[in-house]
Amino acid sequence: MEKDCLFCKIIKGEIPSTKVYEDEFVYGFKDINPAAPIHILVIPKKHIDSLSCITDEDEKYIWNIHKAMNKIAEEYGFKQNGYRVIVNCGKDSGQEVMHLHYHLLAGMKFGEKIV
Ligand code: AMP
Ligand code: ZN
């Protein structure tokens, strides 16, 4: 855990968040500035700067993030209609919080596609 990291503080409960999911490795909470009707951030309970920094030791975090997203999609009822997952990585992507996070977006039809 990093002392000055916003998302580490959220995991520790030092900054409030609206929790939607939690297990041993993963924490999921509502984005404060939603870009879709459902906008959840799914993060590892270990401080990892970004996707470009992952190591073999992080395997269980990455795997469990993906499992958690499936569980959340099922629980919140958007698994069938589909959803979009975005991970910003580094400066050019516009990543603002340097604690790895997966944006899970759902509840609308996404018009614009970058890729
Ligand atoms: P990124 O631009 O990929 O680094 O995304 C950071 C995200 O964190 C943005 O979508 C913000 O709205 C969100 N965010 C920032 N502070 C908080 C907070 N305290 N609680 C929930 N989401 C936050
Ligand atoms: Zn952190």
Image (spheres, rainbow, N blue to C red):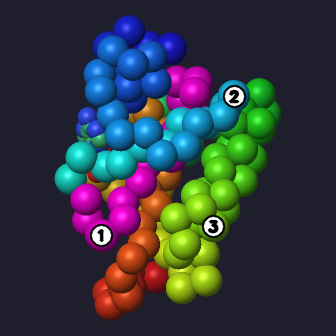
Amino acid at circle 3: Glu
Query: How many angstroms separate mark 1 from mark 3 (CA)?
Result: 17 Å
* Contact, mark 1 vs mark 2 (Cβ under 8 Å): no
Which SS class for mark 1? loop
The residue depicted at 39 percent of the width and 19 percent of the height is: 13
> Magenta residues?
34-48
The circle drawn on residue 74 is: 3
Decide if residue 92 is on the left or right side of residue 42: left
Q: Is residue 16 above or below residue 96?
A: above
The quadrant holding residue 60 is top right
Discs 1/3, front: 3
Query: How many angstroms separate mark 1 from mark 2 (CA)?
Result: 27 Å
The 10 Å Cα crowd at callout 2, few under 14, some 14 to 19, many 20 or more, is: few
Q: What is the residue that sits farthest to the top in this orientation?
A: 3
User: In x, y percent, where is residue 72?
Assistant: 58, 58
The circle drawn on residue 24 is: 2
The answer to if 54 sits in the magenta stretch is no
Amino acid at circle 2: Glu
Which SS class for mark 3? helix
Q: Quadrant of ligand 1?
A: top left
Residue 90 in sight here: no
The 10 Å Cα crowd at callout 3, few under 14, some 14 to 19, many 20 or more, is: few
Q: Nearer the viewer, residue 5 or 115?
A: 5
